[in-house]
Image (tube, rainbow, N blue to C red):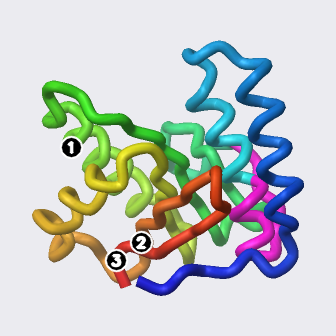
Amino acid sequence: MDQIPSEKLDPENLKQLYDELYEKSAPRRLPKTFEFVVRKRMSVFFGTSFEEKQVVNVPKKFDMVSSDGKIVGEAKRYTRTKNNSGITSTIAEYVWLLEKTPGEKKFIVFGGEREIPEKWLKKHRHLLDGNLSFYFYDMETDVLEELNK
C-alpha cells in the first residue's frame, strides 16, 4: 500500500505534539488525543479545516466535518480485545451513519491495531459504496495509508 505524504506537516512537530498530549493525558484520554491529532493531520491532507459537529439529517456528532459539509470523517482507535465482535458492529454502525451523510467524501481513520480494520474490510468491503475510504494512521511515524483502494 502506498503511503500518503504529509507535505505541509512537519512530522517532528506532530510527534512532539503527540508526546506532549500523551504525557499530559491519562490512558482513558488517549482516544480523544488520537482524534485531535488525526483532525490536524487530515486537515493538512484535505487542505481544509475540520470541526466536530453534526450534519444534516444524521443524529450523530462526527469527529471531522469540513465547513461546507462536503467532507465528513471519523477517527477510531482500537486495540485488540478478547471479543472483537463488538468492534466489528461499531465499525458497521459508523459506516452506515457516514453513508447517510450528504458529504461528497467520507472516511474513517483508524489507529491502534491495524489488523482490526483490515479484517473488517476483508469481510465487508463489497458492502461499501465507492465514496467511503478507510485509512490507517500511525501517530508515531506520521504515516497515513488508505486501506481500501
| Foreground disc of the pair 3, 2 | 3
Q: CA distance from mark 2 to mark 1?
A: 17 Å
Amino acid at the residue labelled 1: Thr
Q: Which mark is residue 148?
A: 3
Residue sitting at 83 percent across and 31 percent down? 20
Q: CA distance from mark 3 to mark 1?
A: 16 Å
Check disc 1 and report the residue beneath it: 88
Which quarter of the figure has residue 112? top left
Amino acid at the residue labelled 2: Leu
Q: What is the span of residues highlighted in magenta in the rendered image?
A: 40-52
Q: Which mark is residue 132?
A: 2
Q: Is residue 104 above or below residue 34?
A: below
Residue 50 falls within the magenta-colored stretch: yes
Residue sitting at 63 percent across and 51 percent down? 139
Q: Is residue 147 above or below residue 25?
A: below
Please state the horizontal and vertical placement of residue 54, each as a whole percent of the image: 62, 43
What is the secondary structure assignment of the residue under circle 2? strand
N-term mark: 3 or 1: 1
